[in-house]
Amino acid sequence: MAEEFPESTFVGVDLATFFNAVDPDDVPINCSFQQASILHLPFEDETFDFVIQRFLGMAYSPSDWETALKELIRVLKPGGWIELAEGNFIMQRPPACYQRFYNSLAAVCLSRGVDISLLHAVPMRLAETGVIEDITIDYLSIPTGWHGRIGDICLASFGAAMRALRPAIAPTMGLDNEGYEAMCQEVLNGFREKKTWFKAPYGFGMKRVEG
Ligand SMILES: C[S@@+](CC[C@H](N)C(=O)[O-])C[C@H]1O[C@@H](n2cnc3c(N)ncnc32)[C@H](O)[C@@H]1O
């Protein structure tokens, strides 16, 4: 995006420090990163023309959501645009072995106050704010492990997410590291075989201009 819009300035934010590992030569000059929480954004009010938040649905408690939306809208200029994009663990045409992983993930998330069966509804939160207008809600269909390069990337990304979740999920499934890896492999191979896909919901809208 930074390369596509060279006249604009882009700022990426994450709690984690992985930006530090990125080779500066790989980053366009109009792009920078800051380690910060979306719940306390280190920016003045009305700084940005466009704000996008993607794949944070599993990170927030219900009260975090209120705070995050307030913060994202606070740093957005009136007349600027906001987008919320999410992943969704509800797979279409999944292999049978996926259900066990999904059930464990859903239970762990629920024990932390996050209902992952509701992730599809995240973009609709824009309407709840009362200050976002001209809202468009839709979803992308994401092939996982088939349909060429995009499917390969999505499968690799899904596999990385499953493996990152291992410390939280493996004990609840009664699996050791080896067993968990075998389960991941079975699920990922199953996605390829069954031509599994999922819906990635997104929504965008404009911050109301008062007066
Ligand atoms: C699934 S990843 C998505 C990363 C990135 N947004 C993307 O779309 O590829 C979730 C990220 O949210 C970050 N995160 C969790 N809570 C956060 C918060 N309160 N503020 C900023 N980042 C947060 C985690 O560090 C993790 O990198």
Image (spheres, rainbow, N blue to C red):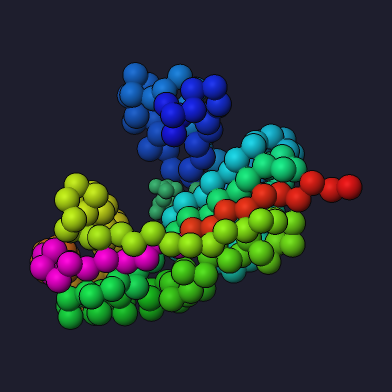
Q: Is residue 144 above or below residue 172?
A: above
Tell me the quarter of the picture where residue 19 sits: top left
Task: Give the side of residue 9 with respect to residue 40, left or right.
Answer: left
Task: Give the side of residue 27 with respect to residue 37, left or right.
Answer: left
Residue drawn at the location 37% of the way across and 21% of the way down: 24
Residue 56, image x and y in percent? Answer: 48, 56
Bounds of the magenta segment:
189-201
Q: Is residue 98 above or below residue 22?
A: below
Number of residue marks: 0
Task: Give the side of residue 158 with respect to residue 125, left or right.
Answer: left
Tell me the quarter of the picture where residue 146 sits: bottom left
Q: Is residue 4 above or below residue 143?
A: above
Residue drawn at the location 45% of the way across and 19% of the way down: 29
Residues 188 and 92: in front is 92
Residue 141, image x and y in percent? Answer: 34, 62
Residues 170 and 30: in front is 30
Residue drawn at the location 63% of the way across and 45% of the way down: 81
Residue drawn at the location 57% of the way across and 59% of the way down: 136
Residues 206 and 109: in front is 206
**Residue 103 is a magenta residue:** no
Residue 138, image x and y in percent? Answer: 48, 62
Question: Do we see residue 64 in this rendering?
Answer: no
**Residue 196 is a magenta residue:** yes
Q: Which quadrant of the figure contains the N terminus?
A: top left
Question: Do we see residue 30 in this rendering?
Answer: yes
Q: Residue furthest right?
A: 211
